[in-house]
Amino acid sequence: MAASLDGFIARRDGRVDWLETSDEYPAGVVMDEVFVEKFLETIDCYVMGSRTYETALAFEAKGMGWSYGDKPTFVLTHRELPRTRDSVEFHAGDLARFVNDRLRPAFRSVWFVGGGVVAGDCLRLGLADEVRYSMLPILIGDGIPFFGKLDRDIALHLAEATTYKSGVVELRYEVRGKPG
Ligand SMILES: NC(=O)c1ccc[n+]([C@@H]2O[C@H](COP(=O)([O-])OP(=O)(O)OC[C@H]3O[C@@H](n4cnc5c(N)ncnc54)[C@H](OP(=O)(O)O)[C@@H]3O)[C@@H](O)[C@H]2O)c1
């Protein structure tokens, strides 16, 4: 996910207005749209929490589009939410069983979109192989944390760091010492 330097992915009320920053870091690289598009093609399905889905629907309603194309998109929820396209499927229950028994056999690359509750669960349950963290040049003081409710240390290996002209630092970590 993209987060402020102080580790928040959204304000407490869900606003992400701070994602557009005006910093300039001349030594950084420019985001390569072709590379991003090629990378997105490697993702086989998306998983997101219901609050992230509701944000995505709100963005779409404002004319900002749907970011997940036709890829299967699994929304975790205990509620009845609007299903706006065939690619969306709802799931409730044990996340580890869902990922290991249902998603892993069917999809090579599973991208957890967020938010913080789901990112925290994913790491806590030892389901994540990688963490991708785009750190924005801003502090917002309070908000929804990137990783909700972790109850132990998660050791990481920094595998890649890219600094952009926009001041964004993109970090890719591999998760070390996964249980089992
Ligand atoms: N900056 C970024 O890159 C980025 C990326 C993604 C999201 N976000 C932001 O993050 C915010 C949402 O994050 P969040 O941490 O509040 O919520 P979230 O992780 O998106 O959703 C959490 C909700 O999903 C449902 N859920 C989670 N696990 C479940 C399971 N195993 N079974 C059934 N339901 C399950 C539960 O809600 P119910 O059962 O009540 O439906 C839970 O409260 C939004 O504001 C969004 O815009 C930011």
Image (spheres, helix red, strand yellow):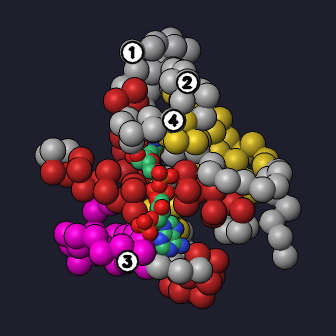
Amino acid, disc 1: Ser
Say whether marks 4 and 2 touch (CB < 8 Å). yes
Which mark's residue is nearer the viewer, 3 or 2?
2
N-term mark: 1 or 2: 1
Q: Are marks 4 and 1 in contact (CB under 8 Å)?
A: no
Q: Identity of the amino acid at label 3?
A: Phe
| Relative side of 96 to 72, left or right | right
Height in image: 66 above or below 35? below
- Specify start and end residues of the magenta stretch as a single range: 65-91
Disc ID at residue 143: 4
Q: Kindly identify which residue carries mark 3.
A: 90
Per the image, label 4 sits on a secondary structure element best described as loop
Left or right: 161, with 168 as reference point: right
Dot placed on the residue nearer the N-terminal end, 4 or 1: 1
Residue appearing at x 50%, y 11% in the figure = 26
Label 2: which residue? 141
Q: Report crowding for label 3: few under 14, some 14 to 19, many 20 or more residues within 10 A (C-alpha).
A: some
In this view, the residue in front, 70 or 100, is 100
Residue position for label 1: 22
Tell me the amino acid under the disc marked 2. Gly
Q: Amino acid at mark 4?
A: Gly
Viewer-side residue, 148 vs 166: 148
Q: Is residue 7 magenta?
A: no
Q: Is residue 134 visible?
A: no
Q: Picture coordinates of residue 3 (x, y %)?
A: 53, 36
Q: Name the residue: 45% across, 14% down.
A: 23
